[in-house]
Amino acid sequence: MKINRSEIETVAVKPSQYPAADKPEIAFAGRSNVGKSSLLNLLTGRKSLARVSGSPGKTRTINFYLINDEFRIVDLPGYGYARVSKSESRSWGEMMESYLEKRPNLVKVIQLVDIRHKPSAQDVQMYDYLKYYGLDGVVVATKADKISNNEKQKNLKVIRETLGMSKDDIIVPVSALKRTGQDKLLDVMEELLSSAEI
Ligand SMILES: Nc1nc2c(ncn2[C@@H]2O[C@H](COP(=O)(O)OP(=O)(O)O)[C@@H](O)[C@H]2O)c(=O)[nH]1
Ligand SMILES: [Mg+2]
């Protein structure tokens, strides 16, 4: 699959603001700063469709991007930002729950984890949550340029084991900096969309 057209369609904090559920959606979830915005820019070939942030924790919205006029990529709010208040983390939870639980056209949530580290407790919790909703099975390991090829296989194995991924589940290493991994990921997304009934 090639992405020829991409635009931000809607920024939402609650379901009444979501676009119509008329196109399949693939969402991205992950810790703040894991590289969600950078991945979106890599996939779409756009330098600044999504804002890449040096300081984590700013995106507190659900961002809907219309791709090729056919489907949407949905950038979910990041988690794991240290300096959030109780009420902020509650509103994050409510925002995630109302999207994941009730969105009929949601095909899959791709979870992003940093390839350098063993997934955090929050990463595992997020992935378990996706399992609960049947939305798990595709993981992107970001910032692949930051480790050697030797380390890569070892780290991918640790990620698989820590998240409790099964044999058939897919993990795609990606580097937004070196621009690698995006073709594989786009193939996976195409496959997901072709099996979606929306
Ligand atoms: N070296 C490297 N840095 C990256 C990569 N992807 C993202 N970053 C950096 O990680 C930081 C957070 O990226 P961003 O895309 O804003 O993460 P988000 O908070 O998940 O949307 C920024 O400083 C990016 O430049 C990558 O593939 N390689
Ligand atoms: Mg972002």
Image: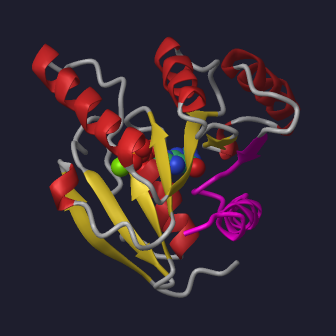
Which image quarter: residue 181? bottom right
Residue range of the region highlighted in magenta in the rendering: 170-198
Q: Is residue 147 visible?
A: yes
Question: Which sits in the foreground, 131 or 67?
Answer: 131
At which x and y percent is residue 77? 32, 41
At which x and y percent is residue 155? 77, 26
Relative to 16, does residue 173 appear above or below in the rendering? Answer: above
Work out which quarter of the rendered image holds the C terminus and state it.
bottom right
Question: Which sits in the foreground, 25 or 142?
Answer: 25
Residue at horizontal 61%, vertical 66%? 197
At which x and y percent is residue 120? 53, 16
Residue at horizontal 48%, vertical 48%? 28
Residue at horizontal 13%, vertical 17%? 85
Q: Is residue 55 visible?
A: no
Which image quarter: residue 100? top left
Work out which quarter of the rendered image holds the N terminus and state it.
bottom right
Residue at horizontal 30%, vertical 58%? 63
Question: Which sits in the foreground, 139 or 132?
Answer: 132
Label count reads: 0
**Residue 22, magenta (yes or no):** no
Question: What colouring does the structure picture have?
Answer: secondary structure
Relative to 172, does residue 169 appear above or below in the rendering? Answer: above
Residue 122 is left or right of residue 58, and the answer is right
